């Protein structure tokens, strides 16, 4: 039996977590030497395009890069994540999937990849909703094409973001859901009716609500209100401080109380130092000292996210938008709940996917990451 000691993330009482064969056996009060670290479940990120120099959508991806990326995410406290493949050439998507599948030959990597998130190509072609997705590959939902990718993925595609503005949407969503794939609405210019139909067909989440939209929307009838008003839709939010202003985050969190979760939507630039870089989505981009990733020639336009979930928690807590406990759950238990990842949780018989961290002066520092009962990251300064 192995164990870890820390303060419970909810009430900060000292606890001892014992685990064996990768699963939590017991969580009990601890009366020994006090420890400063807080213990919580490991982060679950449903949207990771890349991190620390590597991107799943880039040419030259290799299984070794997928492994490296996974290990780098462990250092950030991420124990489960969904590599996110965006709209691209059909064969390039196959190639990326193959690299991910090959990397999964290592059981700890396989354990860390909750599934593939396919964000595209069945999205809106309209400028604004489309975001940075290349227009020439965007198309109507195509079940046969999806099945070809799913075959290559050996069933690993577990989440797909689509826009329900295509007439083929409802049937496609029904087939996805019947095959065990969750469907999210995103990059959309759908009408209220189309959103309602999509939810009836089984769509269960809004992807990064409030982003990838037109700059101006009709004040009453628009797809943000329609998604917010639908009680059956969860919403994922990019709370990095750049994608959504605090007032919107506050409103979304209130309306979607208990049904919100955080995603990083991180790109390969997350984890890199500030500077000017070339991006595979076209053109030069700049990562500012403050952490904003923007187009170099049009600095008002974001070029994706350069932050991980750790930073998003800091942003929410620092701005008093929610508590540390809540924001932590929005990065851990909530995404696990919406994806029905039944083996994850912070209780007996759930996977020993744990983080020990410090939170002080608005900074969250990972001290230790445990994945399936194995210590996969330990901060050098940690003395206990
Ligand atoms: Zn997106």
Image (tube, grey):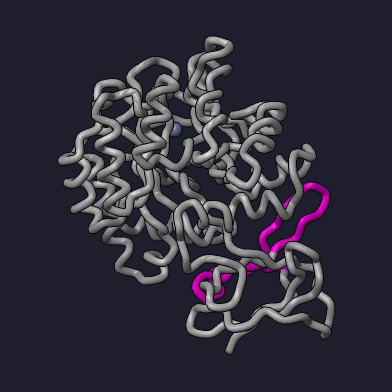
In magenta, the rendered stretch is: 357-381
- Which quadrant: the N terminus? bottom right
Q: Nearer the viewer, residue 244 or 236?
A: 236
Identify the residue at horizontal 40%, vertical 15% (top origin): 127
Identify the residue at horizontal 41%, vertical 66% (top origin): 111
Residue 264 image point, x, y percent: 54, 43
Residue 155 image point, x, y percent: 26, 56
Residue 10 lies in quadrant: bottom right
Q: Is 151 left, or right, of 359 in this rendering? A: left
Residue 172 image point, x, y percent: 26, 37
Identify the residue at horizontal 48%, vertical 15% (top origin): 214
Looking at the rendered structure, the number of numbered marks drawn on it comes to 0
User: In this view of the protein, can residue 238 be seen by the observer?
Assistant: yes
Residue 246 lies in quadrant: top right
User: In this view of the protein, can residue 289 be seen by the observer?
Assistant: no
Q: Is residue 16 magenta?
A: no
């Amino acid at each position: 039996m192995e164990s870890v000691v820390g303060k419970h993330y909810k009430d900060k009482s000292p606890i001892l977590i014992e685990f064996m064969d990768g699963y939590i056996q017991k969580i009990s009060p601890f009366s020994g030497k006090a420890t400063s670290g807080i213990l919580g479940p490991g982060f679950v990120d449903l949207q990771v395009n890349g991190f620390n120099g590597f991107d799943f959508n880039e040419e030259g991806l290799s299984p070794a890069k997928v492994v490296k990326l996974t290990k780098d995410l462990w250092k950030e406290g991420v124990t489960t994540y969904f590599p996110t493949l965006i709209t691209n050439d059909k064969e390039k998507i196959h190639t990326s999937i193959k690299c991910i599948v090959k990397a999964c030959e290592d059981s700890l990597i396989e354990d860390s990849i909750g599934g593939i998130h396919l964000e595209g190509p069945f999205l809106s072609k309209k400028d604004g909703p489309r975001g940075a997705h290349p227009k020439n590959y965007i198309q109507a939902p195509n079940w046969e094409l999806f099945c070809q990718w799913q075959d290559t993925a050996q069933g690993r595609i577990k989440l797909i973001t689509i826009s329900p503005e295509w007439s083929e949407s409802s049937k496609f969503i029904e087939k996805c859901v019947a095959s065990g794939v969750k469907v999210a609405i995103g990059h959309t210019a759908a009408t209220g009716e189309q959103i309602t139909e999509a939810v009836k067909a089984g769509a269960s989440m809004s992807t990064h609500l409030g982003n990838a939209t037109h700059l101006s929307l009709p004040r009453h009838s628009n797809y943000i209100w329609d998604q917010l008003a639908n009680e059956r839709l969860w919403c994922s939010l990019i709370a990095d401080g750049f994608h959504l202003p605090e007032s919107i985050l506050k409103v979304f969190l209130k309306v979607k109380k208990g049904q919100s979760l955080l995603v990083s939507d991180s790109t390969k630039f997350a984890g890199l130092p500030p500077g000017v870089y070339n991006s595979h989505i076209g053109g030069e981009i700049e990562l500012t000292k403050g952490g904003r990733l923007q187009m170099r020639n049009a600095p008002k336009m974001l070029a994706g996210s350069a932050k991980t979930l750790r930073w998003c928690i800091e942003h929410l807590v620092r701005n008093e938008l929610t508590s540390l406990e809540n924001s932590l759950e929005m990065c851990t238990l909530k995404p696990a709940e919406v994806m029905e990842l039944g083996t994850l949780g912070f209780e007996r018989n759930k996977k020993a996917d744990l983080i020990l961290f410090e939170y002080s002066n608005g900074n969250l520092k990972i001290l230790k990451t445990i994945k399936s009962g194995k210590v996969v990251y330990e901060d050098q300064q940690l003395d206990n």
